[in-house]
Image (cartoon, coloured by chain):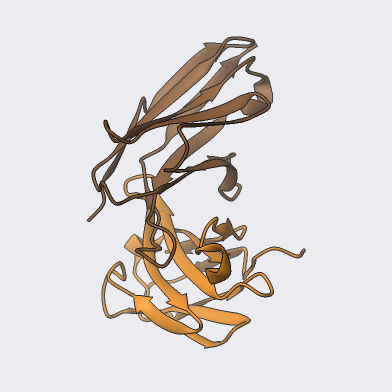
Amino acid sequence: GENVEQHPSTLSVQEGDSAVIKCTYSDSASNYFPWYKQELGKRPQLIIDIRSNVGEKKDQRIAVTLNKTAKHFSLHITETQPEDSAVYFCAASIVPFGNEKLTFGTGTRLTIIP
Amino acid sequence: DAGVIQSPRHEVTEMGQEVTLRCKPISGHNSLFWYRQTMMRGLELLIYFNNNVPIDDSGMPEDRFSAKMPNASFSTLKIQPSEPRDSAVYFCASSSILQGNQPQHFGDGTRLSIL
């Protein structure tokens, strides 16, 4: 089955700096890669996702890049703000109608230092 | 859009008791997923349904766990008998097959404590 590894497990950055979280996956058939943000005591919320037919996707301060050959994808947050502090999870799946299961990484606890 | 609704939000009970967690998916979504989250094991998929039919229950830890989806708007996850190691946050998520089953939208979770 799919295996997703996520690094680093914790990350602290100064407010205004950029943060990068990296994930690798094992199943070359995976083609859908979402990123979820989970604040303390809250539910995971989708912040951005990418499908394997594109290499990069941006949404304001957040971007995700995908390297299918190397089987890794990354989350980039620019101009970080205190409200970006949370745990971030990457995941991988096969869509549509493949293995709908999301395999999650182990999470990255991001702390923004004011 | 009411989102995925889970109940109860918190449950504290003694070991050996039966626990029932409930989930109402987003209207129109036809896939439903049950996850368990712990510090040690992260987010684990327990079981998921497509059109009310269980597709993959390989993540269900043991026979003490069971899940049902009697109709498109309701699902239950039952633990009987409960044990302290079942303490975790249980999330329900739903998605639409018509959108390739992604993205999945999570409910607020049930924080379960077994004493």
Q: Residue furthest front?
A: A53
Q: Is residue A50 left or right of residue B46?
A: right
Q: Residue furthest bottom?
A: B70
Relative to B12, residue A82 above or below:
above
Relative to A94, residue A106 above or below:
above
**Residue A59, position in %: x, y?**
65, 31
Corner quadrant of residue A18: top right
**Residue B30, position in %: x, y?**
56, 76
- Which one is in front, B77 or B58? B58
State the residue at coordinates (56%, 65%).
Answer: B95
Corner quadrant of residue B53: bottom left
State the residue at coordinates (62%, 57%).
Answer: B108
- Which one is in front, B109 or B115? B109
Chain A: give its colour: brown
Q: Quadrant of the N terminus of chain B?
A: bottom right
Q: Is residue B96 left or right of residue B34?
A: right
**Residue B105, position in %: x, y?**
59, 58
Q: Residue furthest right?
A: B1
Relative to A70, residue B52 above or below:
below
Q: Is residue B108 left or right of residue A1?
A: right
Can you see residue A35? no
Q: How many marks?
A: 0
**Residue A56, position in %: x, y?**
50, 30
Can you see residue A3? yes
State the residue at coordinates (54%, 58%).
Answer: B104
Q: Quadrant of the C terminus of chain B?
A: bottom left
- Which one is in front, B20 or B12? B20
Output the letter for the chain in orange. B
